[in-house]
Amino acid sequence: MMPFFLTRGSWFWGSGEILHKLVTLLFIRIDKLVMEEDIYPKGICRSLIEKGLHKDQYITSIFEALTRNSNTKESDMKKLFFFVCVVAVMAFTGMAMAESEPFQLSLTPDVAVHDKSTRIEGATLNIWGENPQSALALGFVNGSTGDSTGLSWGFLINYADSYKGVQWAPVNYTKFNFTGWQSGIVNYTEGATKGLQTGLVNYAGYLTGLRLGFVNYAERATSAVQIGLINIIPENEWFTGLPEALAPGMVIVNWRF
């Protein structure tokens, strides 16, 4: 007797929903390879891509092709075997490309247990470290490259490309975007800050959230409140935008919503 997941017209767990999700994940991966590595998958994928179809269209086409009623059990088995093999290969490729390590010990970015391009998912101990990471980073200088997350606790400096989480250090610097809590003497984010900043001097290119400090400066802001001795939001106008915005510069408190 044919297993229930190979019965005609319903060969995969008796439902198309699970298969469609897996196919979607598979072709998102294929689409990434095509765009980033200039690799064309063969067969129907290549044909559809060369015709300029959107990935949602060829996902649907593959799904329909795989779930079309079959005349034989052998055909169903071939489709199942093909699909499992392709998913396995793509999953293996993804894992290989996403190499990570649980621990890093670093004297400098170039003198460390692991290369500075290795992603750390766990903990790092640094004199001066620099890795992409989702980790607890403890050290004198903690550098986080790429899109990193976690808790960085530095005795001197935390610096990052983009960071989500908590940064504690005398100086915290983020080149692009920061989401979370920065606390130190100086907190400086060139891009957008979303969350809480506490320090003597706080700067952001774009602020969303709350700031507590001696000097607070935001080039632009929305849904933002600054509390401190000097609070500057240059895009505000002098008291004409109340209650949504207060002023370009104010003592004690300033805001923009």
Image (spheres, rainbow, N blue to C red):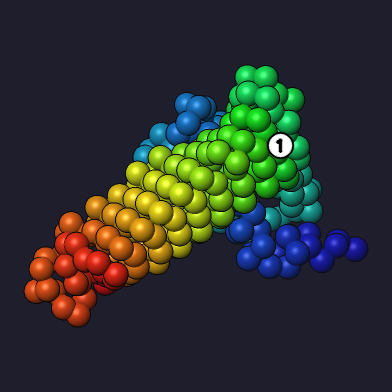
Looking at the image, which residue is at 39% across and 60% down? Answer: 213
In the drawing, does residue 77 fall left or right of residue 144?
A: right
Estimate the x, y position of residue 149 in percent, counting from the top left.
58, 49
Above or below for 141 versus 201: above
What residue type is disc 1 on? Leu
Q: Is residue 27 visible?
A: no
Q: Which residue is mark 1?
A: 125
In the drawing, does residue 114 fall left or right of residue 196?
A: right
Q: Residue furthest top?
A: 110
Quadrant of the rendering where the N terminus is positioned: bottom right
Q: Nearer the viewer, residue 17 or 37?
A: 37
Q: Nearer the viewer, residue 221 or 30?
A: 221
Looking at the image, which residue is at 19% across and 62% down? Answer: 249
Estimate the x, y position of residue 146 in percent, counting from the top left.
51, 38
* Quadrant in which residue 250 is drawn: bottom left
Looking at the image, which residue is at 16% across and 78% down? Answer: 242
